[in-house]
Amino acid sequence: MAKVNQEEKREIDVLFDEYSKSHQHPTNKLIHWICVPLILFSIIGLVTAIPFPHIAFLGKYNTYINWFSFLLAGSIYYYLKLSPLLSYLMLFVVGAMYYFIVQLEYVEQAGGPTLWQVSLAIFILSWIGQFIGHKIEGKKPSFITDLKFLLVGPIWLLHFILKRFNIRY
């Protein structure tokens, strides 16, 4: 009699299982629900603030391309390989965040703080929160062992929303 093959776990499930090991404490989880989106937002802002050269052949579309465009393309491709649905959701989330980045650019143009300053402040404060959460957890952040967990954090949060509505990712 042949053994029944157990369904092998998908790569995304293996990543979520590994990421979850250092995110068990309720306070650490709460901190992650706040700080991971803020870190993502701040990275979008920081990368967007890096000056991008004018490329003549792009014409009027030159203003729509910046360094973040390349980071976004690579990240979404990585997410697409893991889970098409989560990649689409991340594209939506990032699009919403980018709307607010543009609003910060308008504030800067009106004489307010620069985008990179606001983004850097959010980045630093959010990472302080993350490290406090991991101190409470008693475990090091997952990215210490593998940098890809920096990309896993945002979709790990989204997968909980999908699970709540019984949507397979």
Image (tube, rainbow, N blue to C red):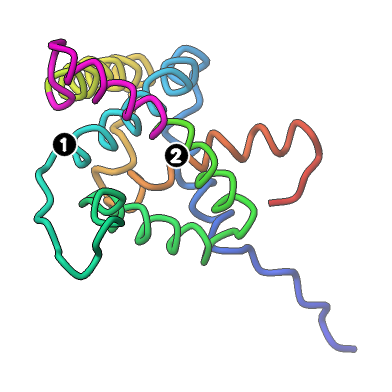
Q: Which percent across, then down, holds residue 118?
A: 19, 18
| Residue 104 is covered by the magenta coloring | yes
Q: Earlier in the sequence, mark 1 or mark 2?
A: 1
Give whichever of 56, 3 is nearer the camera: 56
**Residue linked to disc 2:** 94
- Residue reaching furthest right? 1
CA separation in Å, label 1 and label 2:
16 Å
Q: Is residue 111 above or below residue 151?
A: above
User: In the shown orientation, is residue 140 left or right of residue 154?
Assistant: left
Q: Residue furthest front?
A: 60
Q: Amino acid at mark 2?
A: Val
- Report the magenta residues as a range: 98-116
**Residue denoted by label 1:** 49
Q: What residue is drawn where x is 52% and y is 15%?
A: 26
* Left or right placement of residue 149 versus residue 19 in this view: left
Q: Eyeballing the image, is 104 above or below 66?
A: above
Residue 129 on image: x %, y %: 29, 15
Residue 48 against residue 9 in the figure, above or below: above
Identified at 15% across, 65% down, the residue is 56
Which is closer to the viewer, label 1 or label 2?
A: 1
- Front one among 149 and 101: 101
